[in-house]
Amino acid sequence: MAIPPKHLRDLYQLFASVENTKEAKFLLHDILTPQELESVAERWQLVQALDSGMPQRDIAKKLSVSISKITRGSRQLQYGSGGFGHFLKKKK
């Protein structure tokens, strides 16, 4: 199922309107299920660990996740749209 471009634009504008951590928390807790929020938070943690140079097996052990999840995160970091790289640089 293709997502209508207007729906995506509206969503991007919604996220772009977030002004602070408190607003981000409100929005994320309302827009995502608890499981989705956990998954997104986990992915961000593993991407940060990959970026720091931590070995995949160490990340898997530290975060109690499978190597396949680490591999997917690594692929997104290397071959994704560049969003992770942008925000990792911005965070530093």
Image (spheres, rainbow, N blue to C red):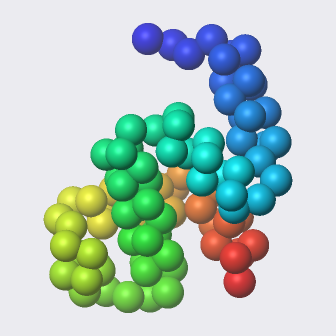
From the viewer's perspective, is 67 left or right of 46? left
**Total residue callouts:** 0
From the viewer's perspective, is 49 left or right of 63? right
Question: Which residue occupies 74% across, 24% down?
Answer: 10
Q: Residue 58 placed where, x, y %?
A: 25, 86
Quarter holding residue 86: bottom right
Question: Which residue occupies 59% across, 61% down?
Answer: 84
Question: Which residue occupies 51% across, 45% down?
Answer: 29
Q: Residue 63 placed where, x, y %?
A: 27, 75
- Quarter holding the N terminus? top left
Q: Residue 19 placed where, x, y %?
A: 82, 53
From the viewer's perspective, is 36 left or right of 51? left
Q: Residue 39 placed where, x, y %?
A: 35, 53
From the viewer's perspective, is 24 left or right of 90? left
Residue 61 vertical placement versus 90 (above, below): below
- Quarter holding the C terminus? bottom right
Quarter holding residue 8: top right
Question: Which residue occupies 44% across, 60% down?
Answer: 41
Q: Which sits in the foreground, 48 or 32?
A: 32
Quarter holding residue 14: top right
Answer yes or no: is residue 75 visible: no
